[in-house]
Image (cartoon, rainbow, N blue to C red):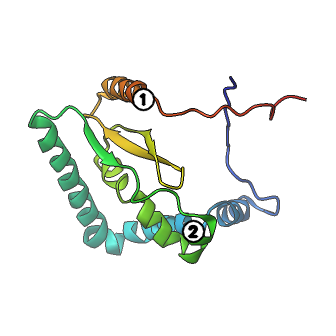
Amino acid sequence: MYIIIICYTGHRSSEGRSTEELYALSRHEGFLDTVRGRILAGNYFLLEKNYERYFLHAQRVRRLIAQDFQAAFEDGVDVIVTPTTISDSPTYAQFCEVDTRTQAERQDIFTQPVNLAGLPAVVVPAMLSNRGLPIGIQLIGKCFQDQDLLTVAKWFEQQVQFPHHIIEDYFTD
């Protein structure tokens, strides 16, 4: 069995003639439109003239989301189980039919609230779709209970016994 570790330190443009130009080009070349749009939106919302209207409002919404999760955990829930995405992976052609922002919104809909609430979450494979593609579930834990969450995730994986595919002979001479 192989263990593959991939380290990615980011993209650095080879064209920058100054530090500012290097950063600008690296961000333009290294990020897709969706990520660049999110960065620009974040910068816009943090402008002094927009701070109260957008940023403080977003912080209030974030706090409400966190409170909803907290209320569930206070009612005796140990782990929340949700879908990870709305469907299995689209084909490449289906993915290309829709702009990347819409694709990101579709694929992030179940994971964004957890990120906003600052809670630990892990995705584990649960089953195969009709097309034979993996479908995962998201397990959400209590704040600072990461170890407990990982214990539940490990137990779930052992119960499901999701098939693991071994990549053979790709890394030998």
The span from disc 1 to disc 2 (Cα, nearest Å) is 29 Å
Residue drawn at the location 34% of the way across and 75% of the way down = 49
Quarter occupied by the N terminus = top right
Q: Would residue 37 be seen by someone viewing this image from the given angle?
A: no
Q: Which residue reaches farthest front?
A: 130
Quarter occupied by the C terminus = top right
Q: Which residue reaches farthest left?
A: 75
1 or 2: mark nearer the eye: 1
Q: Position of residue 30 (x, y in %)?
A: 67, 60
Q: Secondary structure at mark 2?
A: helix
Q: Amino acid at mark 1?
A: Glu
Report the side of 61 relative to 128 (left or right): left
Q: Amino acid at mark 2?
A: Phe
Q: Would residue 1 be seen by someone viewing this image from the given angle?
A: yes
Report the side of 54 relative to 122 (left or right): left
Q: Which mark is residue 157?
A: 1
Residue drawn at the location 54% of the way across and 75% of the way down = 99
Q: Position of residue 88 (x, y in %)?
A: 47, 56
**72 vs 108: above or below:** above
Front in this rendered view, residue 65 or 103: 103
Q: Which mark is residue 106?
A: none
Residue drawn at the location 28% of the way across and 63% of the way down = 58
Residue drawn at the location 82% of the way across and 63% of the way down = 15
Other residues around mark 2 within 10 Å, as few (<14) / some (14–19) / many (≥20): few
Q: Quadrant of residue 171?
A: top right
Q: Secondary structure at mark 1?
A: helix
**114 vs 31: above or below:** above
| Residue at image mark 2 | 95
Front in this rendered view, residue 123 or 22: 123
